[in-house]
């Protein structure tokens, strides 16, 4: 497209030069020199013309991106709706969330392991056996298909307590929606490495889905280069934390680069054992079992906030623009790691 455009611009410059006031200079030039000058002018003029064409393309891309952002917010709205009753592991509302995620994976055409996205597991509470389900799909990498980056986000939350629904919009409908947006992007734009998308269950009270994923992995743990975990990425005005660089220093330059271009403040931290109790998030969410298994992780999340683990963690109390910027930041980080 650009080459053809440049020729048209060159022709226009040629016609303008021949018919214009400057045409008088033409005879004094050797034909080859004139052609060279015109070529130079054409090349000089081309970026502007390209910019016009790019603007149209950018408009289309922006419209598509806008639609993707609307879908992302719709994911949060659906997952945090009262009808899902707080998505407690083992509940009907939790199964509605699971089926919704399956539907999105299917619509995106994500690949599946053993002919299913749903990976059930059992666990014990008070000597009672309960069941949860991870929802797992993948996009095959174009250059290193046998090396895997695993994106995780838990979709369960606290359910109903004292007659109140704990909607868990930030915790963690936001991370799940982010995972679905990333799945949408990367299924259309396959990365170099393969990407596994694991929406995990049973995080609240025990990281159970992530533990199951790591104990019965769909691919060898040694082939997983990185876990990217999203948990609470929508409830802040400006600062998103990313933990993990303390444990794997090689991750830090990529994160520095992403931070410098991010629309929000991406701050590394919350991953050192020297921090006061509770401030080291190394085992605080689903990246914990990956870390225990020796797999590097980056965990994206916000500080605790007044709506954390409250019935007021609803769609109305999240920051929609912050969420969208956070997802874009995570996407850029994945692209940065994938390029390595
Ligand atoms: Zn959470």
Image: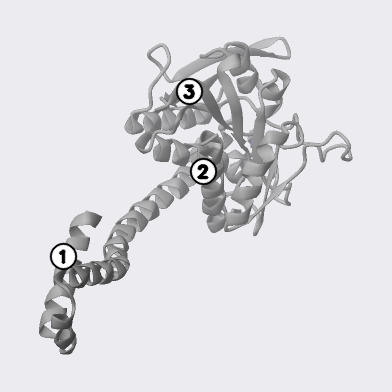
Callout 1: helix, strand or loop?
A: helix
Q: Which residue is mark 1?
A: 8
**Image x and y of residue 198, in percent:** 52, 26
Taking depth in this image into account, of 331 and 303 the one nearest to the observer is 331
For the rendered model, the colour scheme is one colour
Q: Which residue is mark 3?
A: 136
Q: Which residue is mark 2?
A: 331
Residue 70's disc number: none
**Image x and y of residue 134, in percent:** 53, 22
**Image x and y of residue 168, in percent:** 60, 41
Callout 2: helix, strand or loop?
A: helix
Number of the front mark, 3 or 1: 1
Give the quadrant of the C terminus.
Answer: top right
Give the quadrant of the N terminus.
Answer: bottom left
Vertically, is 122 above or below 284?
A: above
User: Residue at 66% of width from left, 37% of height from top?
Assistant: 251
């Amino acid at each position: 497209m650009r080459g053809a455009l440049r020729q048209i611009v060159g022709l226009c410059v040629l016609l303008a030069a021949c018919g214009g006031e400057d045409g008088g200079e033409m005879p004094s030039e050797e034909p080859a020199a004139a052609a060279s000058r015109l070529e130079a002018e054409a090349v000089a003029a081309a970026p502007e013309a390209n910019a016009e064409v790019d603007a149209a393309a950018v408009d289309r891309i922006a419209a598509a991106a806008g639609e993707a952002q609307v879908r992302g917010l719709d994911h949060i709205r659906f997952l945090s709706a009262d009808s899902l009753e707080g998505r407690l592991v083992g509940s009907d509302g939790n199964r509605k969330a699971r089926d919704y995620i399956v539907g999105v994976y299917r619509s995106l055409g994500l690949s599946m392991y053993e002919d299913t996205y749903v990976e059930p597991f059992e666990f014990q509470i008070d000597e009672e056996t309960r069941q949860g389900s991870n929802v797992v799909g993948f996009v095959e990498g174009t250059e290193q298909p046998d090396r895997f980056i695993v994106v995780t986000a838990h979709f369960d939350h606290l359910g109903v307590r004292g007659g109140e629904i704990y909607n868990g919009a930030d915790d963690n409908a936001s991370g799940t929606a982010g995972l679905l947006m990333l799945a949408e992007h990367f299924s259309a734009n396959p990365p170099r490495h393969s990407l596994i998308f694991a929406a995990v269950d049973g995080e609240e009270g025990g990281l159970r889905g992530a533990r199951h994923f790591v104990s019965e992995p769909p691919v060898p743990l040694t082939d997983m280069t990185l876990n990217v975990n999203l948990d609470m990425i929508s409830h802040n005005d400006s600062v998103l934390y990313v933990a993990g660089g303390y444990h794997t220093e090689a991750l830090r330059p990529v994160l520095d680069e992403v931070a410098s271009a991010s629309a929000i403040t991406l701050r590394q931290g919350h991953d050192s054992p020297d921090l006061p109790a509770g401030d080291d998030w190394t085992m605080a969410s689903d990246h914990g079992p990956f870390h225990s298994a020796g797999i590097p992780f980056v965990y994206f999340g916000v500080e605790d906030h007044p709506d954390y683990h409250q019935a007021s963690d609803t769609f109305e109390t999240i920051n929609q623009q912050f969420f969208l910027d956070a997802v874009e930041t995570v996407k850029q980080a994945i692209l940065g790691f994938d390029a390595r």
